[in-house]
Amino acid sequence: MTNYKLYLTSAFSVLLLAFCISCVNGKRKEAADDKEVVASASTFPYDLENPVKYNMPQNLFEISGIVFHNGDPKQVFAIQDEDGDLFYLGLNDKQSKYTKFGGKGDYEDLTIIKNQVIVLKSNGELHIFPLSEINKPEVADVVKVKDLVPKAEYEGLAADEKTGKVYVLTKGSKADDKNKATSIFAFDFNGDNTLKPSGEFSLAYSEIEKLSGEKKVKFKPSALAKNPGTGEWYVLSSVNKMLVITDTNFKVKAVHSLKGGNFNQPEGIAFDKDGNLYISNEGGTTASGDILQFKLKK
């Protein structure tokens, strides 16, 4: 009987020791994971709390999209919600010039590829015209592309000059709500202003929730741009006040909060050729529309 008690005592001790080792290893793994998260945050190449702010002229109060031609920051091109005008100006300019390309409408974003300007309406319709037309009061011939994407609400448009692809991003649709993911449609852009389907991607809400720490995220993105230095996509959401970083295939890598006082209504995003990040805000009750520059950390 005594030997049996000794056996039980020894067995219990072994099990207890194994449990303690498991707990220690688990804590070490959690600590390692925490270090990875902290390291990832510390290596983010932009200080989102300290931008250089450029106030926009009054006619860009509701600025809804921005882009640079070939990444040249000397001149920014922009559109304003509801007006079919292409604006262009230097970041320090007090006045902007503009060229009319369309009538009243819900214009959400723009991009430039192969010296062609493409403007996105909220219903997914695209307006395409030569960049060379900006010296005229009104664009003579605008190509309108309809029924290119499924019926939904759209706010994001971007182009990759190197690959010749154009990307259209949904803000919301029944399909997105059902799949719990935001859809991105890719197209090959040809010289004759035609677009050929070239793939479909998605941003899963679950991945954004996991990295942001927020529950039940219903992602409503407003713009996207490709970082020229890393090839990563930066997806901006005004509704959720967040910036989502993905790889080239839109796999979510990181999520950053934009809930500070600098972000009144972030609607546009762009990079210049040196890798500096720009985010535009629509104006508010006490502020004008603006563009925030976040310099790439050296």
Image (cartoon, rainbow, N blue to C red):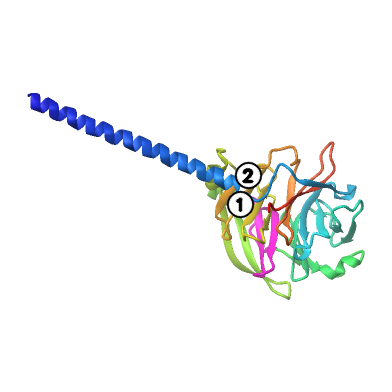
Query: Which of 267 and 151 lies nearest the eye of the viewer?
Result: 267
1 and 2 marks in contact (CB < 8 Å): yes
User: Along the horizontal axis of the image, is 252 left or right of 271?
Assistant: left
From what the image shows, is residue 49 above or below residue 100?
A: above
The residue depicted at 74 percent of the width and 48 percent of the height is: 267
The residue depicted at 70 percent of the width and 53 percent of the height is: 296
The residue depicted at 69 percent of the width and 64 percent of the height is: 159
User: Along the horizontal axis of the image, is 2 left or right of 120?
Assistant: left
| Label ID, residue 245 | 1
- The residue carrying pointer 2 sits among few (fewer than 14), some (14 to 19) or many (20 or more) residues within 10 Å by Cα, namely some
Quadrant of the rendering where the N terminus is positioned: top left
Instruction: Confirm whether the magenta stretch covers residue 57.
Output: no
Q: Amino acid at mark 1?
A: Ile
The residue depicted at 87 percent of the width and 61 percent of the height is: 100
Q: Amino acid at mark 2?
A: His
Residue 153 location (% of width, % of height): 68, 52
| Label ID, residue 115 | none
Q: Which residues are magenta?
A: 147-173
Q: Residue furthest bottom?
A: 192
Residue 167 location (% of width, % of height): 66, 61
Q: Residue furthest top?
A: 2
Which quadrant would residue 41 be assigned to in this image? top right
Q: Which residue is mark 2?
A: 256
Quadrant of the rendering where the C terminus is positioned: bottom right
Instruction: Look at the numbered disc 1 and give the secondary structure of its residue.
Output: strand
Instruction: Confirm whether the magenta stretch covers residue 164.
Output: yes
Instruction: Look at the numbered disc 2 and give the secondary structure of its residue.
Output: strand
Query: Which of 36 and 69 lies nearest the eye of the viewer?
Result: 36
**Distance (Cα) linking label 1 and label 2:** 8 Å
Residue 173 location (% of width, % of height): 62, 50
